[in-house]
Every structure is written in structure tokens, then in C-alpha cells.
Image (cartoon, grey):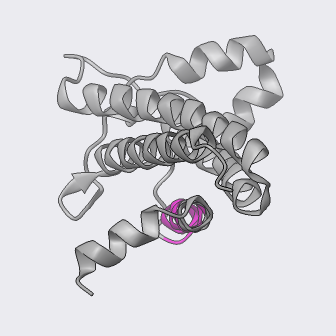
Amino acid sequence: MTLIEATAQFVRKPRHVAVALGCACVGLVGASIFVQHVLGIEPCPLCILQRFTYLGLIPIFFGAALAPVRIRRGLFWAAGILSLAGLAVAGYQTELQLFPAAVTASCSASLAYMLDTMAVTDVLVALLHAGGDCADTSFKVLGLTLAQASTIIFASFVGLIAHVLLQIRTVASRPASL
């Protein structure tokens, strides 16, 4: 069996896809904590939003792996919506990195400081109004900034989730055999 055949067989099983994506999210969150606490690179507000998105996807994917088919479909829809939101955030950060403002200040204060000193609505506005640090491209993995890598990862998640949802729909619409 070739790698392509094995991959095709693997993605035919929604439970396998759910477990793989859940494990990927666990690894990505772990990697982001490593980069922050071991390498000493502070995340910007948009990085934090992406981390929260990955964190939110973990129970959804593992729940989808354990749930019956009708519930699994809803969980994959939720994961798809959350992944699209993550893709939008990562895409926006990638745009900031590719086309930085002529004069950029610090992205903003840390999330902990903002939550201690500001209303939640003001924190959300501050998180979405990113500046300097969010445009920083000094840290790269495999030649990609973390935002570019996250954009590719979220796009891959969306593609796999769409494949699974189409597969679940196809299986559900087949007539029962006698």
C-alpha cells in the first residue's frame, strides 16, 4: 500500500481524522507554550487568539471522535466554523506581516494586563487592533512565520473538515441495505 492509498484510507474514517486533528491541536498549543516560556518569545494578541482557537478545537475534535454520527456531524460543523475563524485571524496577521504599516508601535500590552485593567469589550477591541509585535517576522519555522504556518494549518483543517462533512453527508444519504 502506498502512502497516498494509506492517507486516502485514513481520511475516509471521520473518527481517525478527528483524533489526528485533536492531537495536532494539542501539539500546536504545546509548541506555542514552548516558544513562549522556553524560547522567551512573547505572543502578540493575534497569536493568543489563534492559541485559544486551537484550545477550543481540542475538546471538539476529541468529542467528535467519541460521539455517535449525528452528534459528530454537528461537532465537525462547529470545528469548521472555529477553524474558519482561526484562518481569518492567522490570515490577517500574515497580511500585517507582509504589509506592515510605515510606522508601527508595540502591538499592545500583555493580555493579562489588559484583562486586569480594561473591560472585556475593550480587550476584544484591543486584541483585534494589532500593530507592531503582530507584524514581527523575526521568528520562523521552516522558513515561515508562525502566522503563515498557522494560516496553512487552519486552511488544512478547513479542507479536512469539509471532506469529512461531505463524507458524513454521503453516508447518511445512502439508503439502508436490506
Looking at the rendered image, the quarter that the C terminus falls into is bottom right
- Is residue 24 covered in magenta? yes
Locate residue 101, reporting x and y percent: 24, 17
Locate residue 174, reporting x and y percent: 57, 43
Residue 58's quadrant in the figure?
bottom right
So how many labels did they put on this image? 0
User: Which one is nearer the viewer's eye here, 160 or 178?
Assistant: 178
The structure residue drawn at horizontal position 45% and vertical position 29%, both measured from the top left corner, is 89
- Is residue 173 covered in magenta? no
Q: Which residues are magenta?
A: 23-38
* Left or right of residue 106: residue 104: left
Locate residue 148, reporting x and y percent: 29, 44
Looking at the rendered image, the quarter that the N terminus falls into is bottom left
The structure residue drawn at horizontal position 70% and vertical position 42%, both measured from the top left corner, is 75
The answer to whether residue 132 shows anywhere in this view is no
The structure residue drawn at horizontal position 82% and vertical position 29%, both measured from the top left corner, is 116
Q: Main secondary structure of the magenta part?
A: helix
Relative vertical location of residue 96 with respect to residue 35 in this rendering, above or below: above
User: Which one is nearer the viewer's eye here, 178 or 117?
Assistant: 178
Q: Residue furthest front?
A: 178
